[in-house]
Image (cartoon, helix red, strand yellow):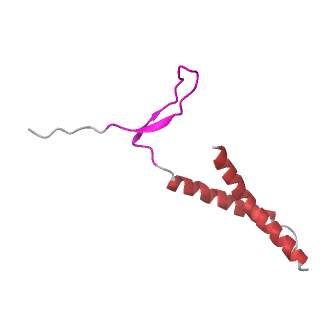
């Protein structure tokens, strides 16, 4: 979870970083850059985060046909990690 938040924070920062790098280069070349378009930058950041959420839903592995096994406490005091296991398949008997 923390790494997904870090990726989303980076996606929010991308439009702002690009704008400020472009503005620094343009002012170095003597162009008038005007005011910072914060509304456009926030909109672009929101669009990138929205696309990342859609991509997460589309490309995330499906676990609907699996059973969740929660983490358990071990005798040594540690905790095992929870995981998904495939459901057992039912054996169909041949008709008599």
Task: Kindly tell me whether residue 32 is visible in this rendering.
Answer: no
Identify the residue at image location x=69%, y=50%.
Answer: 6
| Image quarter of the N terminus | top right
Q: Position of residue 69 (x, y in %)?
A: 46, 32
Q: Position of residue 92 (x, y in %)?
A: 20, 39
Between 32 and 26, the one lying in front of the other is 26
In the picture, measured across the screen, residue 50 lies left or right of residue 21, that is left
Between 35 and 68, the one lying in front of the other is 68
Determine whether 5 is above or below 50 in the image: above
In the picture, measured across the screen, residue 57 lies left or right of residue 93, that is right
Q: Is residue 56 magenta?
A: no
| Image quarter of the C terminus | top left
Q: Is residue 81 magenta?
A: yes
The stretch in magenta equals 62-88
Q: Position of residue 42 (x, y in %)?
A: 75, 60
Q: Position of residue 16 (x, y in %)?
A: 78, 63
Between 21 and 12, the one lying in front of the other is 21
Identify the residue at image location x=11%, y=40%.
Answer: 95
Quadrant in the rendering for residue 22: bottom right
In the picture, measured across the screen, residue 69 lies left or right of residue 23, that is left
Determine whether 55 is above or below 35 in the image: above
Q: Residue furthest top?
A: 75
In terms of secondary structure, what is the magenta stretch mainly?
loop
Identify the residue at image location x=66%, y=44%.
Answer: 2
């Amino acid at each position: 979870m923390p790494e997904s938040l870090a990726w989303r924070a980076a996606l929010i920062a991308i439009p702002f970083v690009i704008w400020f790098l472009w503005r620094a280069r343009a002012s170095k070349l003597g162009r008038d850059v005007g005011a910072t378009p914060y509304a456009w930058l926030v909109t672009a950041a929101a669009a990138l985060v929205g696309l990342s959420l859609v991509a997460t839903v589309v490309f995330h592995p499906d676990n609907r046909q699996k059973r969740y096994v929660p983490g358990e406490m071990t005798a040594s005091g540690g905790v095992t990690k929870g995981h998904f296991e495939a459901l057992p398949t039912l054996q169909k008997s041949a008709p008599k």
